[in-house]
Amino acid sequence: MEEKRIGTVVGYFAKIGVAAIKITDGELKIGDRIKIKGHSTDLEETIESMQVEHKIVDRATPGMDVGLKVKDRVREHDVVYVITE
C-alpha cells in the first residue's frame, strides 16, 4: 500500500467530531481510505461523508477546505494521506 500526501488538518471540532482539512495535492473522494498522522495522532479510516461550506460533496480538489467526520481527535498541522493499493 502506498500513502500519498493530500493535505493538512486546519481545525478540529470536538463536539461534532469533524476535521477541517485543506487539500493541497491530488484529489479526495468519498470511499477513499485516508491516514491522518501527526505528533500524537495516527488515525486510519474510510471517508463516508465530506462537506464544503455545509454542502455535501463527492470529491475535493487542491485549494478546497473540506469537513470530514472522523472517529477520533485530530490536531492542527496533522498531515493527511490517501492510501492507494
Image (cartoon, rainbow, N blue to C red):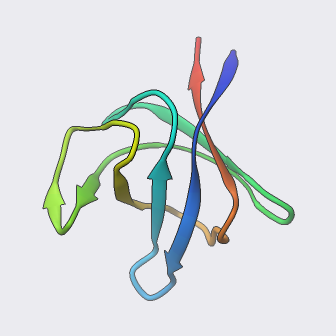
**Residue at the outermost bottom position:** 15
Q: Where's residue 7, x and y in %?
A: 56, 45
The residue furthest left is 55
Q: Point out the residue furthest to the top here.
A: 85
Q: Residue sitting at 45 percent across and 65 percent down?
A: 20
> How many tags in the picture?
0
Say which residue appears at 34% left-offset and 50% top-offset: 64
Q: Is residue 21 left or right of residue 31?
A: right
Q: Quadrant of the C terminus?
A: top right
**Image quadrant in which you'd find residue 2:** top right
Picture coordinates of residue 76, whole percent (x, y) = 65, 70
Front one among 16 and 78: 78
State the residue lying farthest toward the front: 63
- Residues 5 and 56: in front is 5
Would residue 45 appear left or right of 20 to someone viewing this image?
Answer: right
Image location (x, y in percent) of residue 73 = 62, 72
Residue beneath the point at 51% across and 41% down: 24
Q: Position of residue 83 (x, y in %)?
A: 59, 26
* Quadrant in the picture for the N terminus: top right
Q: Residue at x 29, y 51 (%)?
A: 49
